[in-house]
Amino acid sequence: MDLAAISAFVSVGDKGGFRAAAAALGMTSAGVSKAVARLEAQLGVMLVARTTRLVRLTPAGVAFHARCKAILADLDQAGHEASEGSALPQGRMVVSASRTFGRMRVLPVIADYVKQYPQVEVEVRLSDRLVDLVAESVDLAVRIGHLPDSSLIATRISETGFVICGSPEYLAASGIPAHPYDLENHSVVGYVTPDTAVRFTYRFLVDGVASSMSFRSRLTVDDGEAAVSAAARSVGLVMVNDYVVQEHVADGSLVRVLREFELPPVPISVVHLPSRNPSLAARAFALMLRRRLASTF
């Protein structure tokens, strides 16, 4: 396929328009537009919807953009590896991640990583606070959510969203809520942030608007997995990130409810300092993490 056209299309998706993509690529807007049109003709499908005021990806374009961006990242990684000859990852690497996501998704990847690359010494720091990469000498951090404006270099590796679930037994006894307001009449398992005791706020998409709600709970914990365990034992409904309940939903021990009111998912990214180019060890880990998360979400 036409890699130049694919690069132009990916840049349009990333930058949100032909003019911004052209500036990033050092091309003219007309050149970028022709490249995307050439790609659409080759595929026989519209990838970008164009109006006089708006440029957006079509549903087919969104799916194709995600695949192409991953492929281009793999090609870039292959180029780095080729330029470094037969060198294998080695040295020391410090990785930061949130507690629950780190335990459930990052540590299993690191376990396989250190087996594959025994010359790398990995230090993992799990914390729910915003870690300062400079002050704490962190090579890579895995962060969930839209990143604030900063000088950090971020690579999106997956996405996650909040879901609300209950056990089949609880739902049979208490009924299935049809609207977030129905939760006032349900038992919910509460959550507070470790160390700070900040209470979790429930957020839903109601009539197209993100709405925040609070509910009283008979049981409150400061650990996401503990909250899920309580919900699986029919204590009440629980709202957590989808990766925390993925296996429970798959085996039927928990059932997702109010799906039409869920907020859109947020990105999961690997970030690093722009002044510190990732080592071969860090790049190899980021690539392994992205591939593993793509297969589990």
Image (spheres, rainbow, N blue to C red):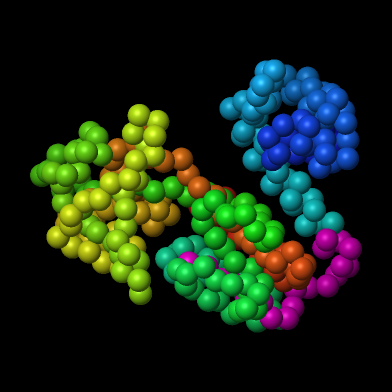
Q: Which of the pair 187/77 is nearer the observer?
A: 187
Q: Is residue 50 left or right of residue 131?
A: right
Q: Is residue 265 left or right of residue 181?
A: right
Q: Position of residue 59 (x, y in %)?
A: 58, 27
Q: Is residue 293 left or right of residue 50?
A: left
Q: Is residue 14 left or right of residue 166?
A: right
Q: Position of residue 213 (x, y in %)?
A: 28, 46
Q: Is residue 82 magenta?
A: yes
Residue at position x 78%, y 32% from top? 19
Q: Residue furthest left?
A: 173
Disc tally is 0
Q: Is residue 295 visible?
A: no
- Numbered range of the magenta stretch: 80-98
Q: Is residue 217 magenta?
A: no
Residue 210, image quadrant: top left
Q: Which of the pair 264/249 is nearer the observer?
A: 264
The image shows residue 30, relative to residue 2, as above or below, that is above
Residue at position x 25%, y 39% from top? 180
Q: Position of residue 245 (x, y in %)?
A: 36, 54
Q: Is residue 126 visible?
A: yes
Residue 48, image quadrant: top right
The image shows residue 74, relative to residue 39, as above or below, that is below
Identify the image quadrant of the N terminus. Answer: top right
